[in-house]
Image (cartoon, helix red, strand yellow):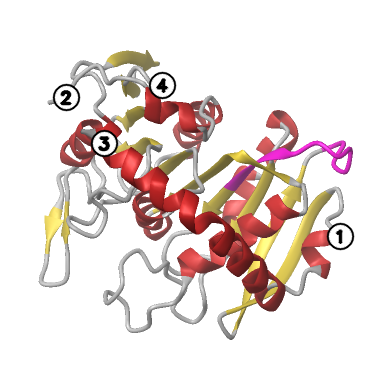
């Protein structure tokens, strides 16, 4: 079933690629001033970018040795509601040198300061998907970012946005939504969704752990969202379980193509996981993401479980 779906998608993609590439290139020239992303320095770069008529902010942290013409893995990180780029930059920028990657901490438009995880939920539908896509494509076209190693993580509102990217974008090799729900309907994968690995980090006392419902949106429970993506990717029914101390349990479901869905469950923790456990979970999530690359071979292998 997945093979047939992907053959149809591949046929459409081969027809559209020249047009899409030209369109994306034109969009990048018009939306990105270019000078800032073309002149990244080693360390932290605080950048303003024009997109969709708005000035958007990102903080780009580059690793030591930046500029040696290597394409680098790229990690986007998204703050929670009301946050700014600075907090997530501090949280994740130390990994730039440790892992040799670009860290892009993006900021949602103010004063709302919330990510557009589904259209029609907030009072304004900002083009956050287009904004992130433009930044990633610009870094790829400039030979800075590795197109097979694009990742994203986010807390709360930023985690919800990761689920939207997983469903709608073909850029990402893996994503790590954290301390968040998953919107039923809006985030469930569809036929056009490509294979992408996901790891959910969540405390078992988080407000979204058991799911929720209100007139605007229903959120899947942690167990339900993992099952939705496990079935979509046709991963094995039984996970590989690894415990990291007494507080962290990591359950990973894998298919023969190498795609994975995992849940990193932190015991006795709520929406804000205490710093030492959060840092440990961050490292586990990053290790998970970095072992995945975006490539076509995933579409050619048989799954282990079609149920």
**Lower position in the chain sequence, tag 2 or tag 4:** 4
Between residues 217 and 230, which one lies in front from this camera angle?
Answer: 230
Report the side of 158 relative to 24 (left or right).
left
Could you tell me which quadrant the C terminus lies in?
Answer: top left
Whichever of labels 3 and 4 marks the residue nearer the N terminus, that label is 3
Instruction: Give the overall secondary structure of the magenta segment.
Output: loop
| Quadrant, the N terminus | top left
Label 1 Cα neighbours within 10 Å, binned few <14 / some 14-19 / many ≥20: few
242 vs 300, nearest the viewer: 300
Circle 4 sits in a helix, a strand or a loop, which is it?
A: loop
Question: Could you give the CA–CA distance between mark 3 and mark 4, rounded to whole angstroms?
Answer: 19 Å
Residue under label 2: 306
Quarter occupied by residue 268: top left
Above or below, comparing residue 209 to residue 120 in the picture: above
Please give the residue where the numbered disc 1 appears in the rendered image: 39
Mark 1 vs mark 2, CA separation in Å:
48 Å
Q: Do labels 1 and 4 touch, CB within 8 Å?
A: no
As drawn, is 78 to the left or to the right of 240? right
- Residue 134 is covered by the magenta coloring: no
Instruction: Compare marks 1 and 4 and give the one earlier in the sequence.
Output: 1
Residue numbers of the magenta segment: 64-75
The residue identified by callout 3 is 4
Of the two numbered discs 1 and 3 on the same chain, state the one appearing first in sequence: 3
Q: Secondary structure at mark 2?
A: loop
Tag in front: 3 or 4: 3
Vertical order, 288 against 93 (above or below): above
Q: Residues within 10 Å of mark 4 (few under 14, many from 20)?
A: some
The x and y percentages for residue 125 are 38, 78
Q: Residues within 10 Å of mark 2 (few under 14, many from 20)?
A: some
Numbered label attached to residue 258: 4
Q: How far is the residue under mark 3 from the one under mark 2?
A: 14 Å
Which of marks 2 and 1 precedes in the sequence?
Answer: 1
């Amino acid at each position: 079933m997945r093979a047939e779906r992907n053959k149809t998608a591949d046929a459409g993609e081969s027809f559209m690629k020249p047009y899409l590439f030209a369109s994306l290139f034109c969009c990048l020239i018009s939306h990105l001033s270019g000078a800032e992303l073309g002149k990244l320095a080693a360390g932290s770069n605080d950048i303003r970018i024009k997109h969709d008529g708005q000035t958007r902010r990102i903080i780009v942290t580059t690793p030591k040795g930046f500029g040696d013409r290597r394409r680098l893995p790229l990690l986007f990180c998204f703050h929670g509601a009301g946050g700014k780029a600075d907090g997530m930059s501090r949280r994740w920028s130390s990994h730039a040198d440790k892992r040799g990657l670009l860290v892009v901490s993006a900021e949602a438009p103010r004063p709302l300061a919330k990510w557009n995880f589904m259209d029609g939920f907030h009072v304004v539908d900002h083009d956050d998907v287009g904004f992130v896509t433009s930044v990633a494509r610009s870094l790829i076209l400039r030979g800075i970012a590795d197109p097979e190693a694009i990742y994203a993580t986010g807390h709360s509102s930023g985690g919800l946005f990761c689920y939207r990217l997983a469903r709608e974008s073909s850029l990402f090799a893996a994503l790590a939504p954290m301390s968040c729900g998953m919107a039923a309907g809006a985030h469930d994968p569809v036929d056009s969704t490509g294979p992408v690995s996901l790891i959910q980090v969540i405390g078992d006392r988080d407000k979204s752990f058991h799911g929720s419902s209100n007139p605007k949106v229903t959120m899947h429970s942690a167990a339900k969202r993992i099952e939705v993506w496990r079935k979509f990717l046709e991963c094995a029914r039984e996970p590989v379980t690894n415990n990291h101390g007494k507080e962290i349990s990591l359950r990973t479901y894998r298919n023969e193509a190498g795609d994975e869905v995992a849940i990193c469950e932190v015991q006795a923790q709520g929406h804000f996981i205490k710093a030492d456990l959060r840092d440990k979970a961050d490292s586990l999530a990053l290790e998970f993401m970095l072992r995945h690359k975006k490539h076509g071979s995933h579409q050619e292998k048989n799954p282990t479980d079609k149920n």
